Amino acid sequence: MKKSILALSLGFAAFGTGPAVAADAAKIDWSKIKATTVTLFYPGQSSYEWVRSAEHKGANTKVSRGASCTSCHDDKDAEKDLGNEIVKGGRLEPTPVPGKNGFVDLGVQAAYDTKNAYLRFQWKTNNPYPGTEHQYLRYDGKEWKVWGYPKLDKVVQEGKQPGIYEDRMSIMIDDGKVAGFAQQGCWLSCHDGQRDNAKPFTKDEVAANAMLSAIKKTDVRKYLPDSRNDPSDWKTGKTVDEIAKLKAEGKFVDLIQWRAHRSYPVGMADDGYVLEFRLGDAGKDMFGGNADSKTHAPKFMWDEKKVGYKSITADSQARRGNLFLIREQNAVPFDPNAGWKEGDMIPDYIISREDAKGSAADNNAIASWNDGMWTVVFTRPLGLANADDKLLKAGSIYNVGFAVHDDNITTRGHHVSFVKTLGLGANADIKAVKLP
């Protein structure tokens, strides 16, 4: 086991130097830039609705009136205490994950120049290896099926599937236009009804919902209160025209996500926003599904001439190395007549930097994993004029929230921060330093 950990750490340290497009970020001397430690905690099902309910004793009225989370949770170790309590199980965590840590200390540094903002994050992973694996397509002897699910999913809880999901680093950005974000941050976007939250949606409810049908969505994800007639009821979505007006007024939050499987290998972070749903920016992401919509068979497989195999198995030695399927580097079209055997596995996602286009392709990121710690650097252009981006500029201050998904988990299984401020050359909780 120790050898496999060493192989991963050495391999990914070298691989994580990033492509040439992000070379500027790799040359920044971060030792000269102050690091701020932000403690992230495990929130469980502490949704927008819960923090306003009588169960949130002594604080629900204050929250409903717009008070900040930190007006009560202001002790030095408040986040650690909250996370360590919630992660054990109870009302806010009905499906506790064995071995899950209650909090994560996130190191944050920031810099900027005339073109970009640079955000550097460091955190220790719960596992002694980087979480770069994601779900697979597995051949069962007759057809290809998804194999590996996040740890909060019922099939993993029941032991029917292994827990497999990529690590993730996310930041939400508000420029002061979203009412309440400066006080309550990402709790504005987390609601009952969403995946893995209390009172989860049903397929029939979603199918009958006019707003979700209008935007062609089949589940319930993050949304902001302004997008609903009743902020506490996801079913009460406003009209497409009303939401378009909110978006034009800038009443959305930017959401940048670095993904250890789906964006890391091509030196990027995806670009999205939250308003009526968690949405991607206009254009195309750097990743896409690898399963054919009709046959469910893979579209691409590994190029055996380049990597030494066309697929892997659950006990394969290859799982200790690079398991990305990158269209320009190591992938070839899937051959259905290649002698597939039960247990053969191919990644469920295909990654391509060349495919990333438009506003969705704004953000670059470099990363490395060494001695149990991820180091991730975002490069975000200043002055973006896209309708789905927050415009970052020198001298301005932004409200931000951070999240880390770690240990094969997604949705609410992350660790999150209370709201912080980020200043580009302006005094804030995290002050970005102007580069020479």
Image (tube, rainbow, N blue to C red):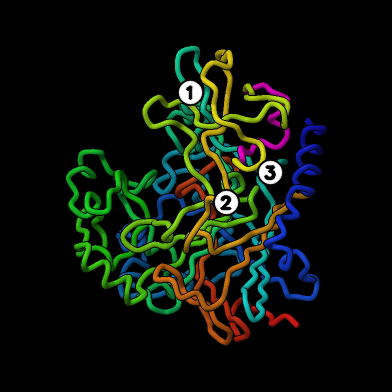
Q: In which image quadrant can residue 163 be found?
A: top right
Q: Count up the numbered dots.
A: 3
Check whether the beta carbons of the residues at disc 2 and disc 1 lie within 8 A of each other: no
* Separation of marks 2 and 1 at Cα, in angstroms: 37 Å
Neighbours of disc 1 within 10 Å: few (<14), some (14-19), many (20+): few
Magenta stretch, residue numbers? 314-326
Whether residue 82 appears in this view of the structure is no
Q: Of callouts 3 and 2, which one flags the residue occurring earlier in the amino acid sequence?
A: 3
Q: Which residue in the protein does label 2 denote?
A: 354
User: Which amino acid type is shown beneath numbered disc 2?
Assistant: Glu
Q: Which residue in the protein does label 3 denote?
A: 130
Picture residue at 72% right of the left edge, 80% below the top: 435
* Separation of marks 1 and 3 at Cα, in angstroms: 24 Å
Q: Which residue in the protein does label 1 denote?
A: 160
Percent x, y of residue 337: 54, 16
**Which of these two is toward me, 135 or 181?**
135
Magenta stretch mostly in which secondary structure?
loop
Whether residue 349 appears in this view of the structure is yes
User: Would you say 125 lies left or right of 399 here?
Assistant: right
Picture residue at 67% right of the left edge, 79% below the top: 113
Percent x, y of residue 161: 50, 26
Dot 3 falls on a residue whose secondary structure is loop
Neighbours of disc 3 within 10 Å: few (<14), some (14-19), many (20+): many
Neighbours of disc 2 within 10 Å: few (<14), some (14-19), many (20+): few
Instruction: Give above or below for 87 relative to 26.
Output: above
